[in-house]
Structure formats: C-alpha cells, structure tokens
Image (cartoon, rainbow, N blue to C red):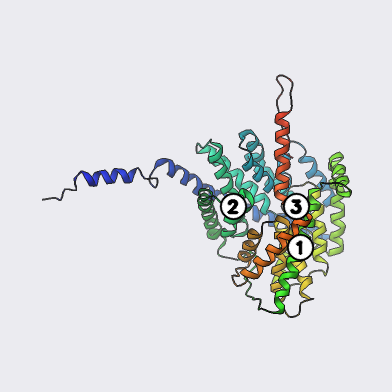
Amino acid sequence: MPRSYGPSFARRLRELGRHDLFAPTQWRRRVALWSGGVLVGLAAIAFARAGDLAYAGFGRMLAASPWLPLLVTPAAFALLAWLTQGAWRATQGSGIPQVIAALAVEDEGFRRRLLALPVALGKIALTLLALLGGASVGREGPTVHVGAGLMHALGRRFGYTDPKALSRFVLAGGGAGIAAAFNTPLAGVVFAIEELAGTWEHRFSGIVLTAVIFAGVTSLGLLGDYAYFGRVDAALPLGQGWLAVLLAGAGGGLGGGLFARLILLDGRGPLARVGALRRRAPVRFAAGCGLALALLGLASGGAVHGTGYAQAHAILQSTGEAPAAFGLLKFAANTLSYWAGIPGGIFSPALAVGAGMGHALSSWLPGADATVVVLLGMAAFLAGVTQAPLTAAVVSLELTANSGLVIPIMAACLLARGLSTLLCPTPVYRAFAARLVAAHEASAAAPRPAGAMRTPSTE
C-alpha cells in the first residue's frame, strides 16, 4: 500500500511555504536587488569604457599640440559650470554627498531631485565631457551616484514606496557602484556601511551584499578577474620598513585633510573669499580654474589631466616615470577641478596623489620596498581625504590583490584618519551632504506666495 504521510507532514509543508525564504514579497525584493545589481554593473562598465574613450580623445588633442588645452579646458569648464547652474545642479561634484543626503532625508521629493534617472544620465554625460576637456576628476563617485539613482528608480518600479525600504535600495546601489567601478566587491560593502550609511545594521549589510554580488558577477563576467592596478606581491618586514607606515600615514593624513579643507571652501580668510568669488561668477570662475589647470598640464607634460589611473599604475608597477613633483601637481589639479564645481569624483585622483606622495617618500626610505611605500601612500592619502580608514584600506588591498599588507595599510590609514581631523574636523563627503540637507530644510521652511512651486536648491 502507498505510504500515507498524514496531516502532520502536510502541515509542515504549509508552514514551510509561509517561511520568509518562499514568501512572494521577499522574492519580489530579491528579484529587484538582483536585477538592480546587474544593471548597476552594466552601467559602471559602460561608463568606464566611455570614460576611457573620452580621455583618449583629450590625449589625441594633447598629442596634436600641448598648447590646445589652454583653449579647450577653460571652455569645457565654463560650459560645464553653466550647464550645472540650472536643472542639472544635482550633477555637480562627486555624487557621493548627494547619496548620503538622500539617505539622511526620507523625503521623496528631495530624493527624486537628487537621484532621478535624468540626473543619473546627466551625471554620466557631464563627467564624460569633463574628461574630454582634460579635467582632473574620477568616475567612481559619479558611479556611486548613478548606482544609487538606478536602484532608487528600480525600487519604486517594483512597488517599494516606504522611505525606509527605498533607503536600503539607495544604499545597495551606492555600494554596488563602488564594487563595479573598481572590481572590489568587499570594498563596495564596506564603503556603503562606513561611508554612506555611517552605521552597521544587519539588514542593510545583507541587502548591500546581495546587490554588490550581482554587480561584481556582472563585472567579472564581462571583464574577467583582474586587479584594478595590477597584482602587487610585496611585503613590509619589521624594522626600518615600518618607518614608512608612520611617514605615509602622517603625510596622507595631513595632505588629505588639507585637500578636504581646500575643496570645502568654508570658514574665514582666503578660502571664504574664493567661495564668494565662485558664487558671484561661477562660469568665469570655472574658466579661470580650467586655465590654471591647463598651465599645470603644460608644466607636468600633461600628466595631471584625467583620473590619474595611468600615472598611478605606472608608479606602482615601476613601468614608467612620473614628474618628481607629480603628487603636488596632481593635488593642485584636483583642487582646481573641484573648485570649478564641475561633475566628477575624487577617488581615483586621490589615489594618484597618494601614489605620487609615496613615490617621493620612497627615496627617503632606502630600506623599504618602493612599491610598498607607494601603496601605503595611496591608501593613507585616500583615508585622509575621506576619513573612512576601513574603506581606504580595503580598496587599496583589493585594487592590488595583496593580502600580505593588511596590518601596515590599516595602521597607516588609521593614523591618516586621526591626523586629517586636525585640519578638517568633519569628513568631507558628510560636510557636503550636510549643506544639501541644510539647503533643503531652509527651502522647506521658507514662506512662499500662494500657488508658487517650491524648488529647493540641491547645492
């Protein structure tokens, strides 16, 4: 006779069917996150390829005549500043502060102004124009902005309208953006929690991890398993080599804190006057920054333009020569590009400055492996700029596929973070995000005539 399972087995099946693992609402969220991760991965890859083509176009112009940037770069900066004064104001700058602000304020109108799909597409287009014009900007910050915008739109498309639920989609999109841009999945999770959210929360971490995995798999499937800066097999023995940790940490912390203070343009004195000048005449000010950057390009043989990836890679792998003052020149180029208010990030340019700084330090430390000193400089300067030491350490380790320098790099990043706060007490991304939130709150509180539409500034 056939075996009878009885009512208890049927009851267990029904209970299993009601488990969260099989619940339709949970599967709806999973499908949204999986498809969103793939979409962010594809967008990051397409953005990276387009960015390479844009900068290659600038390189061909530079090869035709090193004097052409004196005309092209100021004109490009002026055009970008003019375009970002109106409806595309939310595309200004890195894009990471916009994501942090969107997570901090659970107002759907505010979020849509910062993360709407037209803003994401505009961010891509204008960052490409900046690279074509020779700006010293990166694409990782804009990729975070685009990833958050895509996931926010996808969450709404799948029917998620609760602000807290959408916050998780925004956070996941930002983390997936970093993971796909650098091919660094672990750094994507750490960045989302340490920098974007600012807290560790188990539900957030699981959602972020899901999106990052699918973004990473997409990148891995299309581009293969690679290290962004190439594999670095080096070690730092105890002894004189550890002096490099102290010097790189101190240099990265003070230099990164100074850079953050400079681009914030707050306080009193000369920086406040620079900020006032930019507010009075943003287009002409941006053109002036472009001209100054073009002059730096002449002085460096064109090395300060673009993301700085090629120069940092050459320094790290010892495959090319960089100007002795490359770190200082790139530092100035990054400052001018951010002052101009044009779209573009600071992640890759900061790594390039750190590589230049580490290269200069290595000549003072004959007992240490020069490659290790360069890597320490990259990690420490990024930690000094962002004041996110864990993110900086994990990014640097994953970018070079090196797990043997975990302790030295983390020590340098922690030292850099502490010293950076002496010059810039508030982390730079959070300071910019606080301005966006303050502007929104001031606009919301301001009285308006009957029938008038309120359109708060996103700057």
Q: Which residue is mark 2?
A: 193
On screen, residue 282 above or below 218:
above
Disc 2 on helix, strand or loop? helix
Tag of residue 103? none
Q: Is residue 367 left or right of residue 284?
A: left
Q: Position of residue 199 (x, y in %)?
A: 59, 50
Relative height, residue 47 to residue 117 (above, below): below
Q: Earlier in the sequence, mark 2 or mark 3?
A: 2
Tag shown at residue 425: 3
**Which of the two labelled residues, at mark 1 and mark 3, occupies the earlier sequence position?**
1
Which is more foreground, mark 2 or mark 3? 3
Q: Which residue is mark 1?
A: 353
In which quadrant will I find the C terminus?
top right
Q: CA distance from mark 1 to mark 3?
A: 21 Å
Looking at the image, residue 458 lies above or below residue 180: above
Residues tagged 1 and 3 counted as in contact (Cβ below 8 A): no
Q: Amino acid at mark 1?
A: Val
Identify the image quadrant of residue 388: bottom right
Asked if the residue at tag 2 contacts the one at tag 1, i.e. Cβ–Cβ closer than 8 Å, the answer is no
Q: How many other residues sit within 10 Å of disc 2, few (<14), some (14-19) or many (≥20)?
A: many
CB under 8 Å between discs 2 and 3: no
Q: Nearer the viewer, mark 1 or mark 2?
A: 2
> Mark 1 or mark 2: which comes first in sequence?
2
- Disc 3 is placed on an element classified as loop
Please name the amino acid that badge 2 sits on: Ile
**Looking at numbered disc 3 in the image, what kind of residue is underneath it?**
Pro
Picture coordinates of residue 85, whole percent (x, y): 78, 38
